């Protein structure tokens, strides 16, 4: 009979394998939705088509997501997390211009996914949920500073969407110059 420590190790490996399996399933589903959105309008995509394209079972889909909108939200969160996480990085604390450059460059690098959200007629808030994340770990702000932060974030969000919809003609550096001028 195996000892308790060996049993616990086996369970830990199994849990890790399940977590890795779930992550792979989620990635397959997200990738399938991205591909389908390149071919069809979002409202015409069914869960069945996502399942067929991803190669996962219906049970696996529903074990991970409740709807296709939830899958789309996860894809948007990955972009938003990239941007929001960078807001709290020490290297940007005194260098907002570089944050703007990196932010606009990240949007440009993820243009295909960003475009899918716009084609699906989803509001920018579907992608950008950075307001709360940017405040996490920050000292308590005065009401004036909190509202100033919200105004900046909302303005930057609108600038990003407008820049994207107009073909990203300006370089990330040019956009950083404009944002630095407007907001700092």
Image (cartoon, helix red, strand yellow):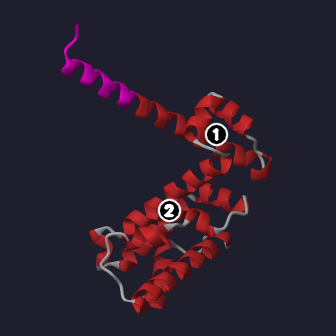
Is 5 included in the stretch rendered in magenta? yes
Q: Earlier in the sequence, mark 2 or mark 1?
A: 1
Crowding near pointer 2: few (<14 within 10 Å), some, many (20+)? many
Q: Position of residue 49 (x, y in %)?
A: 73, 36
Residue 80: mark in rendering: 2
> How many marks overall?
2
Residue 82, image quadrant: bottom left
* Residue situated in front as seen by the camera: 154 or 6: 6
Residue 32: mark in rendering: 1
Crowding near pointer 1: few (<14 within 10 Å), some, many (20+)? some
Overall secondary structure of the magenta stretch?
Answer: helix
- Magenta stretch: give its range: 1-17
Q: Position of residue 134 (x, y in %)?
A: 41, 71
Residue 108, image quadrant: bottom right
Q: Position of residue 62 (x, y in %)?
A: 61, 37
CB of mark 2 within 8 Å of CB of mark 1?
no
Q: Is residue 168 above or below residue 115?
A: below
* Residue situated in front as seen by the camera: 136 or 163: 136
Q: Which residue is found at the position 78% from the left and 47% from the top?
A: 40
Q: Is residue 36 above or below residue 167?
A: above
Q: Is residue 142 visible?
A: yes
User: Element under label 1?
Assistant: helix
Q: Residue furthest top?
A: 1
Q: Which residue is found at the position 67% from the left and 56% from the top?
A: 116
Quadrant placement of the C terminus:
bottom left
Q: Is residue 39 left or right of residue 113?
A: right
* Residue situated in front as seen by the camera: 145 or 161: 145
Cα–Cα span, label 2 and label 1: 20 Å
Is 130 included in the stretch rendered in magenta? no
Residue 45: mark in rendering: none
């Amino acid at each position: 009979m195996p000892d308790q420590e060996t049993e616990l190790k086996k369970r830990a490996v199994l849990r890790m394998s399940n977590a890795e399996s779930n992550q792979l399933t989620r990635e397959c589903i997200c990738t399938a939705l991205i591909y389908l959105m390149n071919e069809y309008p979002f409202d015409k995509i069914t869960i069945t088509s996502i399942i067929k394209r991803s190669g996962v079972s219906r049970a696996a889909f529903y074990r991970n997501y409740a709807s296709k909108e939830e899958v789309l939200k996860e894809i948007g969160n990955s972009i938003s997390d990239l941007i929001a996480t960078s807001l709290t990085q020490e290297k940007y604390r005194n260098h907002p211009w570089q944050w703007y450059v990196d932010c606009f460059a990240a949007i440009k690098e993820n243009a295909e996914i960003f475009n899918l959200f716009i084609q699906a007629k989803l509001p920018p808030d579907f992608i950008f949920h950075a307001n709360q994340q940017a405040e996490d770990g920050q000292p308590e702000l005065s009401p004036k500073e909190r509202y100033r932060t919200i105004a900046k974030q909302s303005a930057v969000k609108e600038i990003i969407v407008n820049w994207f919809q107009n073909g990203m003609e300006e370089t990330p550096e040019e956009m950083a110059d404009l944002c630095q001028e407007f907001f700092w």
